[in-house]
Amino acid sequence: MTFRYRILDLCLALMILICLTAFGFKPGPVFAQELTIATGKTGGGYDRRALQIAQRLGQRGLAASVLNLNGSDEISLALCGGRAQIGLMQIDAIYARSLEGCQMKAVGSYGSEVALILFPPRSKLAKLSDLQSGSAVLVDTVGSGSELFWRTIVRIETGDQGSNDGWSQARAVNDPLELANTSAEMGEIDAVILVRKPDSADVQGLLGQGWKLGELWDRDLDNLKFNGAALYLPSKLQIPMPGGKSAKAWGYEVRSFVVVPRSIAEGDRIRFAAITASAQ
């Protein structure tokens, strides 16, 4: 009797599906696992893009939530640690994790930010190479993209292919950017290195308080290749200044991507296709 009832249940389910299809209902893929998108601080550019991706995933039958973190380094660690399945991050975060054995695949482009060095008002320093072992550089808080950029360029400069120049011996200060002026006035820092959009409030705020754009360049940084291309792209940047003018300064273009772990890229192909489409 039990077997007969199961057959009847299956027949009933099939008849319901046939009827729904006849009236135009087209069942789509159903995914049980909710995806987590690791992104930056609430209200930032990464966060806005992550919310957009989550909405597009929902339209494709994939539930998704957003996990706000401090920056690219924390985001990449969340993906490699299994806390998230999609992330928005700088290319140097992808590079750093690859050195640790965590491979990721880019499924969409976010765009580029720039790496800049700024010196306090009245400072006699003007370029990266002016920093020495006794210098201190504010690089934002731990886990941020700026802090990751600093750690990466120091690793390059002090590595087998680097020249071990004096600037790579400078001390990193992991304080919030709000302390930049006070720390400079107290003689606690000699420069700030930031990865931001050129017109970001952080960059514009420092420039408006008299901070000076410096030259951020080193040949060893230009030479490092990742996936067949330069990790950082050297560029003479056009930086808007408060008041409507602009200034030129050497810095690096830092690209960002939407990425997934290799396990996602090589897993369910229907789900991966939905993620890729949502990331565009």
Image (tube, grey):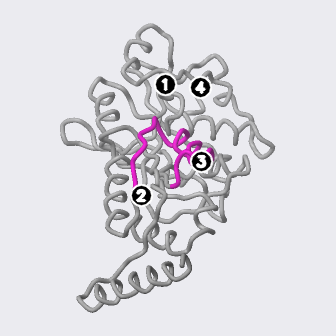
Instruction: Point out the stretch of residues depicted in magenta.
Output: 64-85
Residue at the image point whose x is 50% and y is 17% from the top: 189
- Read off the residue under disc 1: 191
Q: Residue 213's quadrant in the figure? A: top left
Q: Are marks 1 and 4 in contact (CB under 8 Å)?
A: yes
- Observer-side mark, 3 or 4, equals 3
Which numbered disc flags the more N-terminal residue, 2 or 1?
A: 2
Given the image, on which type of amino acid does mark 2 rest? Tyr
Q: Residue 18 falls in which quadrant of the image?
A: bottom left
Q: Amino acid at mark 4?
A: Leu
What residue did someone put label 2 on? 110
Q: Earlier in the sequence, mark 2 or mark 3?
A: 3
Q: Secondary structure at mark 3?
A: loop
Residue at mark 4: 131
| Residue 268 percent location from the top left of the image | 57, 70
Q: CA distance from mark 2 to mark 3?
A: 22 Å
Question: Which residue is painted at 37% across and 17% down in the image?
Answer: 181
Using a 10 Å C-alpha cutoff, classify the residue at mark 2 as few (fewer than 14 neighbours), some (14 to 19) or many (20 or more): some
